[in-house]
Amino acid sequence: MDYDVLILGGGIVGCAAAYELSKYSLNIALIEKDYDIADDVALINSAIIYDGTECEDTLMAKLEIMGSNLMPDITSKFNIPYKKSGYLIIAEDDASRKKIDQMYTNAVSRGVKDIQILDSEDVYKMEPNLNLKVISALYSKNTATVFPYDLAIAYGEVAFDNGVNFKLEEEVLDIKKINKGFKVITNKNKFTCNMVINTTPKEDYSIDVTEKLQKNRSNLGYFLLDKNVQVNFSNIITSMNENSEKIYLVPTVQGSTVVAVNSEETIDYKDSIDKMSKIIGNISENDISTYMKAAFYNDSIIIDDSLIDQGYIKVVGKHYGLVSMTPAIAKIVCETIISNVNCVLKKNFIDKRREFYRFIDLNNEERKKVINMNKDYGKIICSCNCVSEGEIIDSIRRPLGARTIEGISRRTGALIGSCNGAQCMTKIARILSRETDKKMIDIVKDSKNSKIVVSRIKEFDEM
């Protein structure tokens, strides 16, 4: 056998499963079709860690509760920003108030503590700058915000340092059962393994047929406000109305604010701004750093171990709370695998991430020390977010280092300031070209079809 376990998919769940399994004496590989891992994580690098209060589905709520309990320890040892915040779910009308009352009843039955129903007077005392009509609200003290992309990358880096073999730019074409184990066929190779963890199921694999799940999704338009905009709210806030629209306000761990509008109807940029103003008052377009549209998923996450006796397990579904659930899903999958294979815990397991620096988070004395160690940290490339050349080089040279412009942006915070990369895009492309020994015309934003430079201008020896 080439491997004991093959993990299909390098999203946040696949990387977390690789981390958990790398604690054991197993030969593991992870296969990912894209240039980089964690491409399933939202571009705006901030996610709510839910506590199961808001979730209608009891099983999903239990995964959120388990994941949120594990998250502080994981973020601490991986040195990932994690910020505890209260969570206000606000009812704007009587229909929403009934939903909130039901949420409270469900949460209490699930054992969620530190939650309460507040009246409008209590809400306005807590958030005096709230520009919204409040009937009542459900308040939880258990939630937090985290960098989901950093979390996924950290899972992958630690798994890599513990021997997991990452195979990028390989697409799985089929999974076949053989006499002993499986044959996994990609566009580049054929691998044999004893067990498969499939986090990217598709319908035409030979091993099984993935049932078509009913997709429960709505439209999401979200804004990242400029870091200089003063939004004076201390809690994560969600407002609900009788039209099933929800508006989210999320203070990020870096001190900026994300505002999102969730609607079953198609929403455009102007409508999103108007709805956003219901919470925080009038906002100028100059106050908006980034605007994006995405789907808001509310499917069930299914951990399907019906074929575990053959050595096959898959994770199906998309859910808005996936980041919260990931530590729990990875634990469950790992426990299922190790109960069906002979292995022992490693004595030399490395349970920390390699050190790195974020210049924007350092004080001047700390910056001087870092620059004295490496002069590249004294060259600021992205002025908006104070990202140095040293950080960019490190993001490329690290385990599973960036190979695209977007990979650098996500790892360092470059290119997402107020100039949206106008001042630093070319500089970063040149650094990536130099560090990967590629021509500028081969540097891509995030995929094969997204070249930064289409072709070279013809050069002349003489004019």
Image: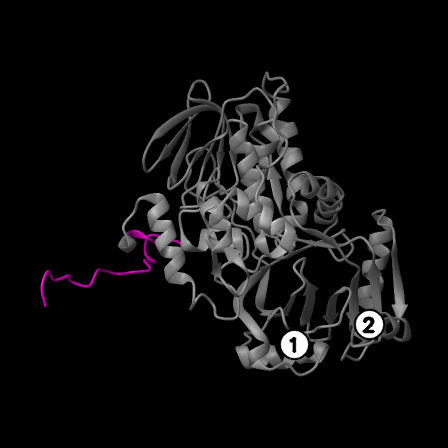
Question: 300 or 3, which lies in front?
Answer: 3
Judge whether 271 appears above or below 369 on screen: below
Residue type at mark 2 is Glu
Question: Mostly what secondary structure, the magenta segment?
Answer: loop
State left or right for residue 302 relative to residue 181.
right
- Residue 446 on the magenta segment: yes
Q: How crowded is mark 1: few (under 14 residues within 10 Å), some or many (20 or more)?
A: many
Q: Residue at x 82, y 70 (%)?
A: 97
Spot occupied by residue 72 in the image (x, y as percentages of width and height): 73, 44
Image quadrant for the C terminus? Answer: bottom left
Sequence order check, earlier mark of 1 and 2: 2
Q: Which residue is situated farthest in the left direction here? A: 462
Spot occupied by residue 451 in the image (x, y as percentages of width and height): 32, 58
Report the mark closest to the observer, 1 or 2.
2
Disc sitting over residue 127 in the figure: 2
Q: Name the residue under label 1.
A: 276
- Residue 347 on the magenta segment: no
Question: 304 or 78, which lies in front?
Answer: 78
Q: Residues within 10 Å of mark 2 (few under 14, many from 20)?
A: some
Spot occupied by residue 22 in the image (x, y as percentages of width and height): 57, 27
Disc sitting over residue 66 in the figure: none
Residue type at mark 1 is Met
Q: Say if residue 249 shows up in the picture.
A: yes
Question: 252 or 463, which lies in front?
Answer: 463
- Image: magenta residue range: 442-463
The answer for how far apart the CA atoms under marks 1 and 2 are is 16 Å
Picture quadrant where residue 14 is located: top right
Spot occupied by residue 17 in the image (x, y as percentages of width and height): 58, 35
Q: Residue at x 54, y 52 (%)?
A: 41
Judge whether 66 appears above or below 337 on screen: below
